[in-house]
Amino acid sequence: MSERKVLNKYYPPDFDPAKIPKLKLPKDRQYVVRLMAPFNMRCKTCGEYIYKGKKFNARKETVQNESYLGLPIFRFYIKCTRCLAEITFKTDPENTDYTMEHGATRNFQAEKLLEEEEKRMQKEREEEELNNPMKVLENRTKDSKLEMEVLENLQELKELNQRQANVDFEAMLKQYKELEEEQRRREQEEDEQEMKAMLEQAQNRRLLEDSDSDEEPTKPRPNPAAQSKPTDILQEGPQPQSKRPRMESWERSVGKLSTKAQLAGLVARRKEKEKEKEKADPALENGMETRGTTASTGSLPAAAAAATSSLGLLGAYSDSEDSASD
């Protein structure tokens, strides 16, 4: 495998390069090359547009018996992308361009046609002047008139530029500033007038509201003591938040006890129940006096203390409720 990487070839001692036969190729031989369309063209067969820059696999050949200053001219053969018709064009080194030969028409060559027309007119004029001296005089007078017109137009442009150069830009800026200040002052005056009108409307509205409030009679305030239902509190309005939560929590836990007469009735009922129990069980008085005395002596002080504390709390609560209702 090392032989394929060798760059030097072996030449035997009897090698003679003159004995190598020369390859004879025709002068009009063709090569396959890859190129892009040099201009926009339209196929004559199917009307397909081929735009500039489209790539083709073309055949290239040298044009026989044509050259420009020793430079050869090449011809290229391409095929239409739609109908596969053959299109040919060749190089034009004289105009540094390409010329269409067969199979399509070139588009967007107005500039080139204009240049060709100008060259043709210039050539015809030279031929006419060569044999007709009067035509030379006419052409010279036309050229002189055209030159005078161009000079007049140029003078007008110069005068116009001078007029613009004499313009006082400072005066223009000053005038613009004065107009701007006047417009600003006018806007401020309009704003002040609008503000005055709005203030007058607000004052008139306030006076009307004050007069209406003086004419209306005063509404009587509701008496909180006259509320009998709990839902009346929600209809009339919110109560003070400091006393209401205590009253609601007490009423939920114990119940509503507002007078001392009710408390006294409760204590009396409890004593009556104890007497009824003693009457119903006479054995307790005779047989178990000691046990009953110990139980009564142990339970009476605690019951008395609880009764007195509850009486004090209920009395304080009733006093606070009476003060709130007043």
Image (spheres, rainbow, N blue to C red):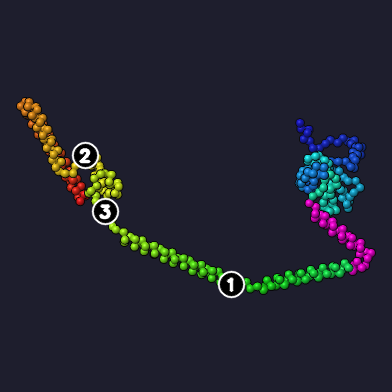
Choose mark 3 or mark 1, whichever is in front.
Answer: 3
| 16 or 138: nearer the viewer | 138
Q: Which label sits on residue 254? A: 2
Determine the CA span between mark 2 and mark 1.
92 Å
Q: Mark 1 or mark 2, which is nearer the start of the sequence?
A: 1
| 21 or 284: nearer the viewer | 284
x, y (%) of residue 326?
A: 20, 51
Three-letter amino acid code of the residue under disc 3? Arg
Q: Residue at x 88, y 68 (%)?
A: 138
Is disc 3 in contact with disc 1, using a CB cutoff of under 8 Å?
no
Q: Mark 1 or mark 3, which is nearer the start of the sequence?
A: 1
Residue 226 visible in the displayed image: yes
Neighbor class of circle 1 (other Cα within 10 Å; few <14, some 14-19, many 20+) is: few
Residue tagged 1: 175
Q: In this picture, which residue range is highlighted in magenta?
A: 108-137
| 156 or 252: nearer the viewer | 252
